[in-house]
Amino acid sequence: MLGGVEVIVRRNNLGLFIVIIIIVLIVTGFFLTPKVFSRIKLKPTKSGMNVKVCKAHVGNVQNQVDVTVFIKSQNYKEYYGNNLRVQKILVKPGDYVQKGQKLISFDNVDMITQSTQAQIQLENAILQKNQMILNRDNFKKQKEALQDEIDKIKEAREDNESFVAEVEESFESSKIFPSKNTLTISTYNEELEKLVKEGEDLRKVLLELERQRDAIPVITDDQIKLMENSIVLAENSLKNIQSKLESYKDIEADFPGIVTNININEGSYSQPGAIIAILQDTQNIKGLALISQQNVAKVKEGQEIVMNDPIGVYNGKIKKISELAINSSNYSNLINGRDIKDNYLVAEIEILNPNDKLKIDFDLEGKILLEDKTDILKVPIECVLYDENNTPYVYIVKEGIAHKTSVVTGGVFNNYIQVLEGVNSYDNIIISPPKDIKDKEKVKVVGSK
């Protein structure tokens, strides 16, 4: 009896002890602060960042350049204003015209008058120069003739002066040797007076001849040069007016085609540089494509191009590439108002299978076929990164570890890039590696491509 009671008491004491222990643990947990818990650092288990991978694979690629092809007429002509008043518009948009048919006539009477006046001025300048040269030659001959007379008169005066000297000498000799004197004083005086009069007459004649000689105008080489300059100016003026008259003439069709635009009204003045009419040959079309600067070295004459559009698929060949670059400001009729800030070369495309559905001013998406490559090792372009030295590299996953691996790349083909060295076809390569990934970091593959 007492033994049983003792057993019961022991059981009750054990239960009480257990209850007390539980109460102590609860109170202790209640009084533990968050600061205490914060000091307890639990080391998490790291499974690595999630990545997607793909395998480099060997395959065939076709390199191509995407372009927009603008359909244009092979024969395309823009006619510009010329500052003249439009007298008559003889066609309307949509009219088919023959080569040489008049499209627009202008009132160019004033220009014809100016041309006539300029022609007359040139002819007058030529006549004046020729007359001046003729006068110069005549004046020269006249002077030469007068100079010959002057020289003769001078010679006669010298002879006269000699005779006077001889007479005077003879008279003086008679005074010394009277027996030798054959002249009387009266005869001497008559002879001397005669010679003096002849000398005076010769002097007067000489003075008159010299006056006539000196009165003849002198036409210099500079004066002739001035006349030649006047001719040059008159010629240039006439050429300028004739050039304007050529551009001011009535507009005629350069080839058979359809008038697609008329941008002027009768009676109004056309502005120089403004397009007032457009003529196109709608039966013969071509394609034009803009080749960007980065693709200039790839695109060559003779390459094929495929143009896709809901209206059909068209094949073409690059016929010619422009030598000079163009931009949006000087080729606005080609790009149809698109905002193009870079410079481009223009590729002219021969369309090999045109049809009635393909219209002028349509634009098609085209692919220029550059070259085919077979059996090349390639990876998606988003797998390849570049370091600060522009050296390409990829991350290859081996046994859950990402290994940074330098590679040697080749060409880019659509969304793939050729890898020449650094990877094998069985390697798992990370697609779009995370920015914070590091070499030899543990990763977890969650998907593949």
Image (cartoon, rainbow, N blue to C red):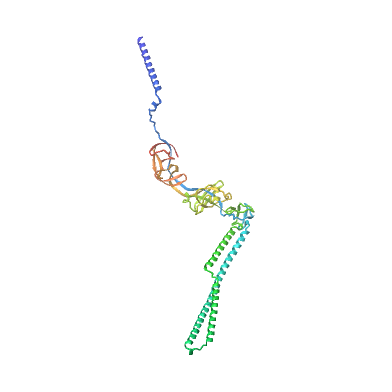
Do we see residue 2 in this rendering?
yes
| Residue ID at (55%, 64%) | 230
Q: Is residue 394 above or below residue 110?
A: above
Q: Quadrant of residue 432?
A: top left
Can you say which quadrant of the picture contains the C terminus? top left
Can you say which quadrant of the picture contains the N terminus? top left
Name the residue furthest top: 1
Q: Is residue 233 above or below residue 215?
A: above
> Where residue 412 sits: x, y (%)?
45, 46
Task: From the viewer's side, name the closer residue of 333 and 68.
Answer: 333
Q: Is residue 143 above or below residue 29?
A: below
| Residue ID at (62%, 61%) | 113
Do we see residue 280 in this rendering?
no
| Residue ID at (52%, 68%) | 221
> Where residue 41 sits: x, y (%)?
38, 29
> Where residue 342 sits: x, y (%)?
50, 48
Q: Is residue 33 left or right of residue 269?
A: left
Q: Is residue 443 above or below residue 28?
A: below
> Where residue 364 sits: x, y (%)?
54, 48
Disc count in the image? 0
Task: From the viewer's side, name the closer residue of 84 and 185.
Answer: 185
Name the residue furthest bottom: 179
Q: Quadrant of residue 391?
A: top left
